[in-house]
Image: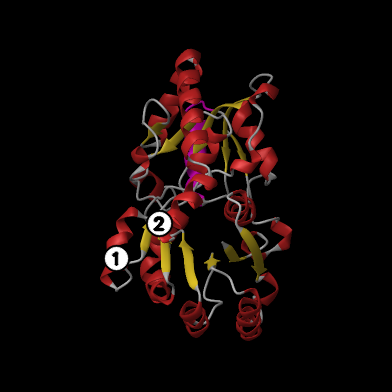
Amino acid sequence: MKILFIDLKYDYGDKARGINYIGQDGFKESLEQLEHKVESFYYDAYLSDTRLLQLTLIEFAEQCQPDLIFFNLFKDQFDHSTIRGLSSKFTTINWFGDDQWRFESFTKYYANDFTWCITTDLFSVEKYKSIGQCNVIYSQWAAINSHALSQELFTGYKYDVTFVGGYHPYRHWFIKQLRNNGVRVEAYGYGWPNGPLSFQQMNIIFRDSKINLNISNSNSFDLSYLSSSLKALILAFRSKKSTSQIKARNFEIPYFGGFQLSDYVPSLESYFEIGKEVVCYSSPEEAALQIQYYLTNDELRESIRHAGYKRATNEHGYIHRIKNILKQIT
């Protein structure tokens, strides 16, 4: 097929944050690997002039004449009339990746503008149908298969416990609790003292860590956290992110050869066998206990790591997701 791919080129449209690797190396690269002809339309430069964006996109699509237009909406930069107009001439589809907390405030206003919708939230499928959008596909985030690391280059672990992800008050509190329990954690990402990593550096960290923590960036209603500061209490009740969700990190860690210790997220068991391919915790105290256990039980930890790696590389790359999505709409 000829596919018009519409997304931000840079992370959050900010060049200083680097390439939007999920869009570039996940969606677009997978479409190309499946031998589709892909034309890209990046709208970073139009974020401050959405009127020009509408006109430019419509003209671009008319010239391109695609079989499919694949959107990855960021916010409300596209007018409803623009999307509906394109949907009247072409097959359109959008990736809605945050329905756990954005369905009511965002998705439900745009869903019916598209021919097809993709949701990463199993529990939102019926919500789509309730507003009249029956062409909904449940898919999930994944790992970028084009960046696979050679496990032959592994020369030994350099870290006991690491965390890779942007700073969030709950994540800061969680890591502080681990440190109070004698667990040393190296944290990387925007807002942490160690700073952000390139995609390649992140993958190497996953491989070179005995234990990779996955900590939700949703607000927790753990009483210990809420009582830790007035700021924590205020943020918890102001933020819309009140439920955790499966994210790309759940697949990236094992895909690049890492052992994953994650907070439990609903439907995670549909992708990994808990206890055999991924290990889950429900509190900082439980996480600390499991970290100490798996750091001293190398054989069991390595068994889980290898099983998770096998599952992820066989089933959880973006190419697997895109292939399944296209199969359903063609």
Circle on res. 159: none
Residue 240 position, x and y percent, is 41, 63
- Res. 172 in view: no
> Closer to the observer: label 1 or label 2?
2
| The C terminus: image quadrant | bottom left
Q: Residue placed farthest to the right in the image? A: 16
Residue 247 position, x and y percent, is 47, 48
**Relative height, residue 108 to residue 26 (above, below):** below
Q: Secondary structure at mark 2?
A: helix
> Would residue 31 be found to the left or right of residue 105 on screen?
right
Please give the residue where the numbered disc 1 appears in the rendered image. Answer: 127
| The N terminus: image quadrant | bottom right
Q: Which residues are magenta?
A: 169-183
- What residue is shown at x 66% (from left), y 24% (from top)? 158
**First reached walking from the N terminus: tag 1 or tag 2:** 1
Dot 1: few (<14), some (14–19), or many (≥20) neighbours within 10 Å? some
Find out whether residue 132 is within the magenta segment: no
- What residue is shown at x 42% (from left), y 67% (from top)? 116
Residue 181 position, x and y percent, is 47, 28
Please give the residue where the numbered disc 2 appears in the rendered image. Answer: 328
Between residue 135 and residue 175, name the one nearer to us.
135
Instruction: Give the CA distance from mark 1 to mark 2.
Output: 20 Å
Between residue 168 and residue 241, name the one nearer to us.
241
